[in-house]
Image (spheres, grey):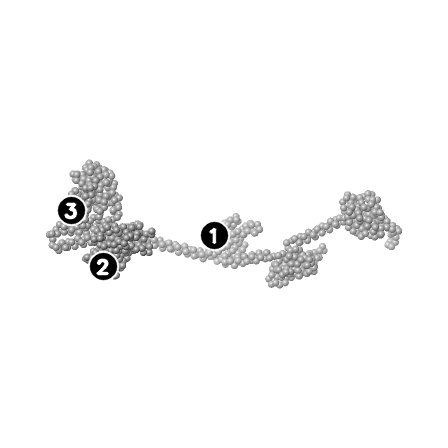
Amino acid sequence: MNAKVVLIAEDDDNDLFFLQRAFEAANVKNPLCIVRDGQEAIEYLSGTGNFADRIKFPLPHLFLLDLKMPRKTGIEVLEWLSGQPKLRCLPIVVFSSSANRKDIDRAYELGANGFVVKPSSMVERAELAKAMGLFWLESNEPPTICSEGLVAARKLRTECIEP
Amino acid sequence: MEGKEKPFDRGLLANIVDYSEDAIVSKNVDGIITSWNKGAERIFGYKANEAIGRPISILIPPDRVDEEPGILSRIKQGERVEPYHTLRRRKDGTFVDLSLQISPIRDETGKVVGASKIARDISEQMRSQERLRRSEERFRVTLGSIGDGVIATDTQGRVTFMNGVAEKLTGWSQQDALGVALDVTFRIVSELDRGVVENPVMRVLREGCVVGLGNHTILISKDGTERPIDDSAAPVRDAGGEIAGVVLVFRDASEKRDAQIAAMKLAAIVESSDEAIISKDLNGRITSWNKGAERIFGYTAKEAIGKPISFMSAEKEAEERKVLARIKNGEQVEHYETTRITKDGREIDVLVSVSAVKNPSTGRVIGASKIMQNISGRKKTERELVEAKRQLEVHAQRLESEVAERTAQLRETVAELEAFCYSLSHDMRAPVRAIQSYSEMVLADDEKKMTATSVDYLKKVVSAAERMDQLIQDVLAFTRLSREEIELGPVDVDSLVRDIIEERPELQRAKADIQVESPLLQVKGHAASLTQCITNLLDNALKFVPKGVKPQVHVRTEAHNGNVRLQIEDRGIGIEQEAQRRLFQMFQRIHSSEEYEGTGIGLAIVRRAAERMGGAVGLHSEVGRGSQFWVELPGINT
């Protein structure tokens, strides 16, 4: 399984559905792994709980993170990530409904690599998905942590569980 | 026995001669000494046996040798030489003053055979005369040099002596004044009524005692100059105690009088002063108490003088003692405020200044003077002022806490508003997005399966959702403008406008005719906010044109009272006068959505952005001819 995985953290069913449709429409075929809140996102990335199987749940080459989510918000996930030496370099694009100045600056401070206001129309969304696929999943060279695969992820898991 | 031949008792005579104090000497016509009594021995120092038989010239000083021949010739002629004063030489060579009387000695026939000399030693007499003369001289010199005028008169009141000062003050010379009545040379009148004052000499002569002139006597000199004088007259008595004359002593009292007048003026000032002026000695006893003190404290001078200074306010005794001790040490005492109790029991505030009273000649501190001012009125005002200030502070505090409370409430409201906006942007946009997206998907997937009406409805759903989303975003933009801090700086309007036009496809030449009057002036503002303004105004200019007409827009800047006015002018449909007033308010739309799309927030954003940058907005418009919107911002002085 060498496919480059996209991890999507999104609690809204509709938005998740639109995003999946957009990747389809843009013909981006990479596997999309889904978590439904911030807490799940943390568990996924650290390989704990339901996400212990790294073969099923590998580290993503791109992490699309919604800001407003239950249990843990996107900002809280970023805060957690910035405390993880290996994971902090994951490519992350934050999705939000608004261009809140504070949110944007805070996200970048905590290591986000992009900030996108969720498009409203299907067409715009498809264009965005296409652009992201082209850039992050094809042109971009990911950090080691993404390409080393399972070995790195296993090591990482113990680090995350026993901080 | 008388008339008879005188039966001389020779023994008796010889005794008389012998024991006489005077020298009794006889000589013959040749000047040879023939007899020499005990008196002669004592006066001249020669014994009888040393003198008899020798020439009388042994007694004559060399400078008087001429005397003897004359005397001898007169004696030979039988004349007497009346007593005269001369000088003779003693045996020891010293000289002696003598009163000499010489008588011829005749024999029984009456022939002059010699001469008898009676010489009296008058050295002592001469000395006392000299002393007297000297004493008189000294007296004269003394009187002459004395600082006071001195006039002596006889018992008739006529001038017998006048010293230099008297000459100066009266204008008479002693020479002219001698023998002149005192009334004439010493004219005096009373200073008060210019009435004639009785001549003191007359009173002395009448009463026989020392007389002092009354005060306020003025002496009028010979040339009419008037001077205040002090004088006194005393009788001069002779050895027998009888009045022999009067001596009058007087002096120019001008300076003293001036000093007196000055002192009186000062005293009058002290008396009439509103302030209490009090003096005390070093024991703290009151020595003076003016009218001001009477008025302020209620005690009369009579009640206060002689009492210890602390009699008014016993509890202030320590304070008084301390102040007095400092005065005694020669220290300066600053003004100070304290309180005193008046006679009628009121406590009053006083401002006190204390200074030392010194003996003018020795400079030693002999007491203290105190000037006390009743400042009760002032203190009352001060206290009222303090109270007013305190109340003001209470008010201010209350106001402050109210402001703080309201600010807190306002902050809470703002926080709530922010939370509302945040949720508006996230939670409200999500369903709108869903409506739009699902509608679009249905249209994309199943348009061919639907009736034309359904398709039309669904398209309306999409456009309504789009408008709703735009509305939310505009409201967010507006509130963000109000909330976010912006920093003002120079903005290059020219390149800003060009960038905006370049980036927006709908502003390109093909779709719109936009003329920019380059170069546009720079302003002080905030690039992002200004971009929003210009974008919204250009959007409007392009939007509000009659259907099918290519929009024409003119952009230019004008200097306007130190500001820069950015004008965006269109040839569009224009705006009615009525509508212009409410144009910049939120949610104000003049046209229906069918005619012209819009949320009614665009111009409100323009106005808010301009105001945040310290500027203003406005418009000029005519229906059918177009509108000219302007944004005025501070200019940059180059």
Asked if disc 1 and disc 2 are in contact, CB closer than 8 Å, the reply is no
Separation of marks 3 and 1 at Cα, in angstroms: 97 Å
- Write down the chain letter for disc 2: B
Q: Is residue B498 visible?
A: yes
- Distance from disc 3 to disc 2, alpha carbons, whole Å, reads 42 Å
Residue B460 locus on image (x, y percent): 16, 55
User: The disc numbered 3 marks a residue on which chain?
Assistant: A
In the image, farthest residue toward the left: B449
A41 lies left or right of B395:
left
What's the mark number on residue B571? Answer: none
Does the rendering let one see residue B247?
A: no
Amino acid type at circle 2 is Ile
Left or right for B115, reference B561: right
Q: Which mark is residue B573?
A: 2
Q: Nearer the viewer, residue B96 or B305?
A: B96
Out of B411 and B405, give the one closest to the viewer. B411
Under mark 3, the amino acid is Ala
The circle on residue A25 is 3
Residue at the extreme right of the image, as rendered: B109
Residues tagged by mark 3 and mark 2 found on one chain of the structure: no
| Residue type indicated by callout 1 | Tyr
Residue B271: % across, % down: 53, 58
Front in this rendered view, residue B83 or B541 = B541
Q: Nearer the viewer, mark 1 or mark 2?
A: 2
Q: Position of residue B607 (x, y in %)?
A: 27, 55
Residue at image position (73%, 49%) is B127
Q: Position of residue B180 (x, y in %)?
A: 69, 60
The residue tagged with tag 3: helix, strand or loop? helix
N-term-proximal mark, 1 vs 2: 1
Provide the chain ID for the residue under circle 1.
Answer: B
Q: Which mark is residue B336?
A: 1
Image-quadrant location for residue B184: bottom right
